[in-house]
Image: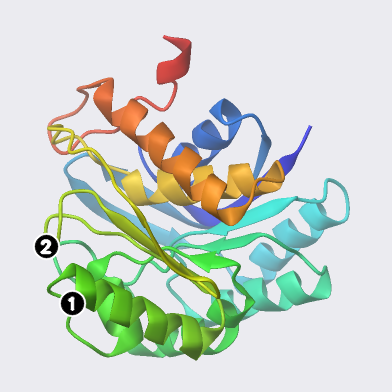
Amino acid sequence: MNTALTIAGSDCSGGAGIQADLKTMTVNGVYGMSAITALTAQNTTGVTGIMEVTPEFLEQQLDAIFTDIYPDAIKTGMVSSSELIRVISAKIKQYDATNIVVDPVMVATSGAKLISDEAIDTLKEYLLPLATVITPNIPEAEVLSDMKITSEDDMVTAAKVIFERFGCAVLCKGGHQVNDANDLLYTADGPVWFKGKRIDNPNTHGTGCTLSSAIASNLAKGETLENAVKNAKDYISGALAAMLDLGKGSGPMAHNYVLL
């Protein structure tokens, strides 16, 4: 069985973070493992507490995984401190890891900044150049490209800038600020659009985590990057279309919809 590793925070309500990642990896046919960067107290209405792990403990988790069950792909999620980002980057290099999907969680869809400027600089310097593909939303792509994005042409321009700046493929996620659900993959071969279908479901907690984990799962199975993205988008569409409705806020998706 192919294997995948998520390096991210825990969401105790199960809709995002490593819980969403592990569900996604399992349903997408790979063996999922996790290295936890932080514990969070959160639910569908918001986050009430964060307890970050020490760099030493993250290092221990990663050594334990790499020296026993080597991952065929890795997905990284929200990592809020420079020290943790440096540990992840060092271990990726130490163990010659491949198929690295970085969800550069920096800016919420609402526009709120989620990590410090120092951590963003560390992410840019250490982790992004190691990525196979990064999956920024529009606000994150704006930070990484130093430009405003208000159209699909802007998405192409920004993705090209990011690709040339960091040397990794870019999946720039559309969304309501620019378009409904059309994502742009930019690689050395140029831009490829993935048209998404608009699904009228307000319960979208964990969509970013789920998409990046699905891409990593497909890469772990040997899919090309383009096929990995296509299959991941199809999976997200199915999980949203199942119309799961849990919690008092923006609820989670039905990660296990194929089993229902």
**Quadrant in the rendering for residue 207:** top left
Mark 2 touching mark 1, by CB under 8 A? yes
- Circle 1 residue: 149
Which quadrant, please, contains the N terminus? Answer: top right
Q: Secondary structure at mark 1?
A: loop
Residue depicted at 67% across the width and 64% down the height: 57
Label 1 environment density (alpha carbons within 10 Å; few <14, some 14–19, many ≥20)? some
Q: Is residue 78 visible?
A: yes
Q: Position of residue 52 (x, y in %)?
A: 47, 64
Q: Is residue 89 above or below residue 208?
A: below
Q: Is residue 132 left or right of residue 98?
A: left
Q: Position of residue 29 (x, y in %)?
A: 64, 29
Residue depicted at 75% across the width and 50% down the height: 72
For badge 2, the amino acid type reads Gln
Q: Is residue 32 left or right of residue 166?
A: right
Label 2 environment density (alpha carbons within 10 Å; few <14, some 14–19, many ≥20)? few
- Circle 2 residue: 177
Q: Secondary structure at mark 2?
A: loop
How far apart are labels 2 and 1 at the CA level? 9 Å
Q: Position of residue 183 (x, y in %)?
A: 32, 56
Q: Is residue 172 left or right of residue 176?
A: right
223, 136: nearer the viewer: 223
Task: Spot the residue most to the top.
Answer: 260
Q: Is residue 153 left or right of residue 12?
A: left
Residue depicted at 19% across the width and 55% down the height: 175
